[in-house]
Every structure is written in C-alpha cells, then in structure tokens.
Image: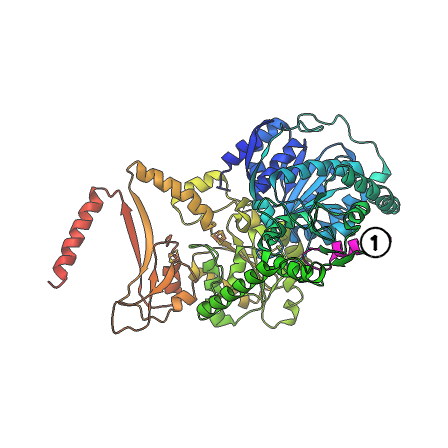
Amino acid sequence: MERQFNQEIDLLKLRAGEVFRGEGILAVTKALLQSGVSYVGGYQGAPVSHLLDVMVQARDYMDELGVHVEACTNEASAAAMLGASINYPARGAVTWKSIVGTNVASDALSYLSTAGVTGGALIVVGEDYGEGASVALERTLAIALKSSMWMLDPRPELPTIVRMVEQAFELSEASSTPVMMELRIRACHVHGSFVASDNRTPAVSTKKQLKAPAAFFYDRLAHPPATFKHEKIKAEVRLPAARRFIAEAKLNEVFPGTEQNIGLIVPGGLYNTLIRSLTTLGLADAFGHSRIPILALNVVYPLVPEEIAGFCAGKDAVLVLEEGQPEFIEQDIGTLLRRADLQTRVSGKDLLPSAGDYSSEVMVRGLEKFLGRYAPKLDRSAAAKWLQDIDAVRAKAAELLGTLPARPPGFCTGCPERPVFAAIRLAERDIGRPHISTDIGCHSFATFEPFSMGNSILGYGMSLAAAAGVAPMMEQRTLAIMGDGGFWHNGLLSGVASNLLNRGDGVLVIMKNGYASATGTQELISSPPEAARQIALGASSVHADRTIENALQGMGVRWIRNVVSYHVAEMTQTLREAFTTGERGLKVIVAEGECQLERQRRLKPAVASLLGSGARVVRTRFGVDEDVCSGDHSCIRLSGCPSLTVKDSSDPLKTDPVAHVNNDCVGCGLCGEVAHAAALCPSFYRAEIVQNPNWWDRLLFAVRRTVIGWLQPA
Ligand code: SF4
Ligand code: SF4
C-alpha cells in the first residue's frame, strides 16, 4: 500500500490533555489504544479501511505498546481472532465492512457469542447501508440480534464515538458478551476533535506475555452440552447485566425539549441527520437544541425497558426513526410499552419508508406527517416550503439532464483489468458470448458500459463457486472472473477446491493486479515484494511472486496460463484456447498486470525527483490522428478508457466527432494493442515525450524538423 499515514500515526501517539483533530474512524483507532487493547485484526473495506491500514503502518509503535496487529485474510479469520478474549483478560478489536464481512464472519461470531468473553471484545463494522453503499443492502443489527451480541450505534461526534469505544470494552466485560459497533459512512468520515487520554498498557500483550495457557474449562467451549447452558445464560445473566451497565453508564442520551407531548427516538448514528431535519423545520437550532425531546440510542441492542418507558411516559406519541426493515427497534419499543402498560402511540414505518437511507429529505417528510398527526399546532410551513423547493429543483434537473447519458463508474485510466475485458470481447467473436460469473472487486466495473459483462455476483471470491450449478447445464464452457484479493479471501477454497473435488470444467480468469485494489491497495500474500516494485518503476507491470500459480498447481490444477494483461492478442488467443480445448478440467488464466493506481502512486514522485535532478525522462503517450480517424468509435467500445474520448473534427467534411486521447493518458499501451488485435483503423499513434532531452535528442529533433520542413509544401 503506497498511501502513507504518517500524520495519522502521530495522532495515535497523542498524550493526555492534547487535542486530537481528525476523522471519526481515526478517533476509533485512538480510542482502542486508550482502552488498552491487546490485539487488533480485521479485513479492509470502506468505510473502515483506515482503522486497520493505519495500525498496520504504525506497526513499530504498536510493537512499542505491545499491541498485536493482524491483517487478516478474510473476516472469518478476524472474528476467530477474538477467541483470545474467551479465556484471557485480553481486550481485542476487529473490523470489517458490513453486511458482507459480517456474513463471512458469522460462523465464528456465533460461537464467540455463545462461549462469551473474559476480556472485552469489540467488533467495529463499517455499516455500508444507504445511498453510498456498495454491497447488498442489509443491516448488521439482524446479526447482533440473532447471536445476542450487543450493538452500539454512536452519535457521530468525536467525543461520543471515543466514549462509546471505551465503554464498549467495559460493557463487554460486565456482561461477558462481544459488542458490535456499527459506524455508518457519515460517522467514519465526520471530522471533529476530542481531548485525548494516554494510551493504556494492555493487561496482556506481546510485551506482557501469558505465563501459561488457561485451565481446561468445558464451559468455555461452544460445544454441547455447554451450549445448552450458554443459551440460558445469554438471556438470564448476560442480558440483564448489559442492561444494568447501559443504564448506569448512561450510554443512551436524552435531549429534553419543550414539546413534552411528543418525542423522537433515533439510533445515535442518525442523530446528526435528525437535527439537520429539525433545523429545516425550524424546530432546532444549529447547536442541536431541539424543541421536541429526543432519545438518542447509542446502544440499539439491547434496549433498556426502564429507559424507553421513562422517555415515553406521559407522551401522546413517539416517532422511531430507524432505517431498513424489519423495524426491529420500533417493534421492540412497541413490545416494551405494552408490557409497561403505557398508551403512548408508536409511529415509525407507518410514516417513513421501509427501505433506503434516511436522508434529511426523507426525515423531513416523515416528521412533517408525524407533527401533522400529533402536534398540529406546530408551524410546519417551513418544511412544506423546503420540500416544494426540492421538488422544483428535481423537476428542473430532470428536464435539463434528461437527455444526458448515464455516467457509470469505470476502471482507472490505464487499469490492467480493462485489456482483459477487451480481449474477452474479441474472443467472443469466435467462441460466442459465454455465461460470465463475476465477483467483487475492481473487475466488477466491467459490468458497466462499454463491456456490460456478467450474469451473477454472489460475493467476494465466489464467482467460480457461483458457476458450479450453471456449468454442467451449459453447452459452452462458463467463465468465472476473480481478483487476486477474492482468490485469497474465499476463491481458492470455495471455488477452486470445490471445482477440483467435483471434477468440474470451466474457465477461471484471475486478475493478478498485486493488491486488494478496490479497498485501498492493501497487500496480499501474493503482492510483489518491495524490491520488485522499485526495479519495475519503468516497466509496464510488476511480476509478483508466482504464489497464485503455485497454489493452483499444488492443488492439482493442470491447465494454467500466465498472460500479461496488456497483451490483448495473446490474451484473446489464450481465451479461445481455454474455451475450445478438448482437455477437461478447470482452466485458469492468470492475468498479470500491476494495479495502475498503485503504480502511478509510486511512479509520479519518482519521475518528479528525476526531473528535479535534471535527468532525462521519457514518457509514452498514445494519440489519434484525426485525419485518419473515421469516427466509428469501435476503439472506444473495446476500451472504455476515460482518456479515450471524442472531439469535434477540424475537418468540415467530417460531421461525426473523431476519437481523441486526452492528457490523462498514462501510456498503458492498450490503445495500440486493441487497434492491432482488433485490426482497427491505423489512426492510433504512439509518441514518446522526452523531458530534459540530451544532445542526441536535440540533434534528432533538429534533423527531423528540417526534413519535415522540406517535405511540407510552403
Ligand atoms: S484501483 Fe487498480 S485495479 Fe482497480 S480500477 Fe484502478 S487501476 Fe484498476
Ligand atoms: S494508452 Fe489508451 S487505454 Fe492506455 S491510458 Fe492511454 S488512452 Fe487509455
């Protein structure tokens, strides 16, 4: 990973009384150290990647503190790490993106929550739900509920986030239960400050090692017959203990207001949006003082019956603002109020949508209806006017933008995965269009235009497994596409091992770009070693250690080809061979080409330093000769590079726009390869831009200019 977190690492070292200024997710990282965490693990994924990335880069400082940091190969191994807290007084934290990561980790989480913990165990999940989500839209709360793990959802404000992290460990230890903390995208990226405390020396650490293993105690094992006891303990001991702690530590917050007959109950993570919505309605000021009382649930599970009853007593109605469905919190509140024989009406999903992000607009619409029903005397004209304005802007935008084409996300300029899809497109001319089982990772950009490839996405590293049911029923071989990140995360076992066990057939393309690129170019077991990356500064790709190929060979895959992804003609031919050979069994094509983003991060400072020292630097660029370009744009349909665009022709006889390569081109060579492999028009040219030219470059330039001058008519 080329991104450096030096400033962030300095923030982790702040002492008591110093002020931390930064992002929410880094505040969590600092709070872990202030809590005396012994070990941290996880698997990267937005919006929580930075937690682990920073800790991995701060390894020297972590060693100083005695904190063990583990970059896990998937979420299941991260969850299993928390097993250390079952027997030992070691506080541990793990992190991943949810819901997908939590699904992968679920098995270990079930067993962990059954056995219970001695040291505090905290699971920080990036709750990727709502408008910016990149995964299946489900909420982690369902997992917490079914496994009886407590769920925190802190108010997005740094002092509250930090307090909740610290209290999460206390809650975990007080109730012998792992605690989950969901952090929405907005909470992770909220900026603010808090007064730091000193980092705490862990009770058990790499510096204070355990002298002996824990005594054998069957009840620590999540295994029958202990599991029967665990189920009872969860309900009869751990749950009451957790509720007691939550109430005594005042983890949930009540914000009083003057409109006593109504109230709002909101998960802490949505509090800021609620205040913004109330401000729009003229019912709160910018400092968060609301006229309507608010109960902010920093703990969404378990709810404390006395707190809910205490807040609702004497009110005509409360509105529960809870995203998604089923409305677990609302249903829980309804049950608690019935048991307390309180007649307060509970509104929620009757006024708010069942699906989607609760943005300010969604909340304002719901609040407007709630107030109309239960507080009609309050002036709602500001809301009505604001909503009308939004509708008008939206209508105008639709009118103006209606004719514009959609602008889907795509591969970075020069991405090594783009040529592979160009090659698949070319191979399809001979073999026909195959069933394509695709996966999670950068290569999923090929599901968008201009490639529009893929028939299913079933999870990270699952593409080959997802083709297992289709392949035997399909005359033509199926194609599964997987990244090297997905291969190590799950693909090797779920896909390759299963295919071999069942004597499967089919074609698997593994994009070996060297990193888990889509999540921030974190390292993999097959990442190129640092020395190779430095040597390859001028080369078009870095050949990583052949770990993937070795693993495949070791498992018994016989048909393996390694092709540089930019070699479109060779890739096309290899695909044809894989689809047509009479040889049965899995056929794997490893597409080798370093992530261009990572390469450019390394290349740019190196080139700048060479230029600064006056050294000669040659850059490759591609261009389109507009006199030759016929304007059919087949090159664009086979490439999709954002640098390859169109412009008006300067020839008045050409009415169609011509292809054009803009200044972002990194000279990956795909344009030339595609033009050659697809036998396109010869309009592409390759140019070398020489900076800090030497005497020979200057002489050559002068000669060329002179000769061209002679040949050009006066
Ligand atoms: S991050 Fe790397 S692998 Fe992903 S699209 Fe960009 S260049 Fe390609
Ligand atoms: S050579 Fe072509 S595909 Fe590669 S970066 Fe330049 S314009 Fe894009």
Q: Nearer the viewer, residue 104 or 398?
A: 398
The crowd level at tag 1 (other Cα within 10 Å; few <14, some 14-19, many 20+) is some
Secondary structure under tag 1 reads: loop
Tell me if 114 is positioned left or right of 636 in this view: right
Residue 701 in the image: state x and y as whole percent: 19, 50
Residue 177 seen from this side: yes
Is 589 in the magenta?
A: no
Amino acid type of disc 1? Answer: Leu
Above or below — where is 157 with respect to 130?
A: above
Residue 241 in the image: state x and y as whole percent: 82, 40
The quadrant where residue 604 appears: top left
* Residue ID at (44%, 71%): 403
Is 336 in the magenta?
A: yes
The quadrant where residue 176 appears: top right
User: Which residue is most to the left?
Assistant: 714
Residue identified by numbered label 1: 342
Tell me if 62 is positioned left or right of 90 in this view: left
* Residue ID at (60%, 46%): 187
Q: Nearer the viewer, residue 208 or 322?
A: 322
Boundaries of the magenta span = 320-341
Residue 106 in the image: state x and y as whole percent: 72, 50
